[in-house]
Amino acid sequence: MEVKIWIHPVKHVKLIEGHEKNSHCIHASTDGSKNDSGVGSRIAIFSDNNLRATLKYRLNGRCSNNQAKQMAIIKALEYMQYSKADEKTVLVYTDSRITLQMLQNHKKYKHIIEQIRTKVIEMEEQEWLLEFSWIKAHAGHNGNELSDQLAKEAVSSKTIEECYTRIPKSAVWSDLNEQSVKQ
């Protein structure tokens, strides 16, 4: 059985409104995608408005779109934490309001959400300034459009090893219901 370590409610993820003028040196645009081909996450990392890295990951095909979007965030944070960045101010963009709401709601204990919360606290202890912002999907924001396009590529890529296999409970229940109907 997995031991859960609950994060104290006073520790929280910082959200900001808007994205046009800010003082963050690093911007990470994250996205996830799910279709009939599979589930994938993609990240575009910008430093001083220059594209520095693109990352893509594939999840188990039964994972959800929300899990893909959340996995993109945790993978972006991991990448930045271990990069040799001089500046440690980061703004993470996501088009997933549900993910941002879950990060703020300490009554929600989803596995990847807890990983994100834990990583944020760990990085803040290393003097990172991390903030998150919602961005409207398909609205012309370069980083979001790039991460969206690349997430769709990650979905269909068979050369990328699966990085996450914890399927949502809803998929398990769906499978059980299908099996009971067939019997």
Image (cartoon, grey):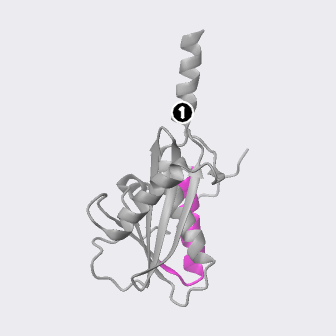
Which residue is pictured at 37% across the width and 64% down the height? 144
**Residue 27 on the magenta segment:** no
How far across and how far down the image is residue 82, in percent?
A: 63, 77
In the rendered image, the vertical position of residue 114 relative to residue 53, given as above or below? above
**Position of the C terminus by quadrant:** top right
57 relative to 22, above or below: above
> Residue 87 at x, y = what percent?
50, 89
| Amino acid identity at mark 1 | Ala
Please, is residue 3 above or below residue 174 in the view? below
| Depth order, front residue of 7/166 | 166
Q: Which residue, given by chain and number where applicable, does mark 1 sit on?
A: 171
Q: Nearer the viewer, residue 129 or 167?
A: 167
Picture residue at 60% right of the left edge, 82% below the top: 126
Residue 157 position, x and y percent, is: 57, 51
Main secondary-structure element of the magenta-colored stretch: helix
Q: Quadrant of residue 79?
A: bottom right
Q: Is residue 106 visible in this depiction of the protein? A: no
Q: How crowded is the residue under tag 1: few (<14 C-alpha within 10 Å), some, or many (20+)?
A: few
Q: Quadrant of residue 163?
A: bottom right
Total residue callouts:
1
* Residue 113 part of the magenta-drawn span: yes
Residue at 57% across, 57% down:
57
Q: Which residues are magenta?
A: 111-129
Looking at the image, residue 20 sits to the left or right of residue 131; the answer is left
Tell which of 166 and 52 is nearer to you. Answer: 52
**Residue 14 place in picture, x, y as percent:** 41, 71
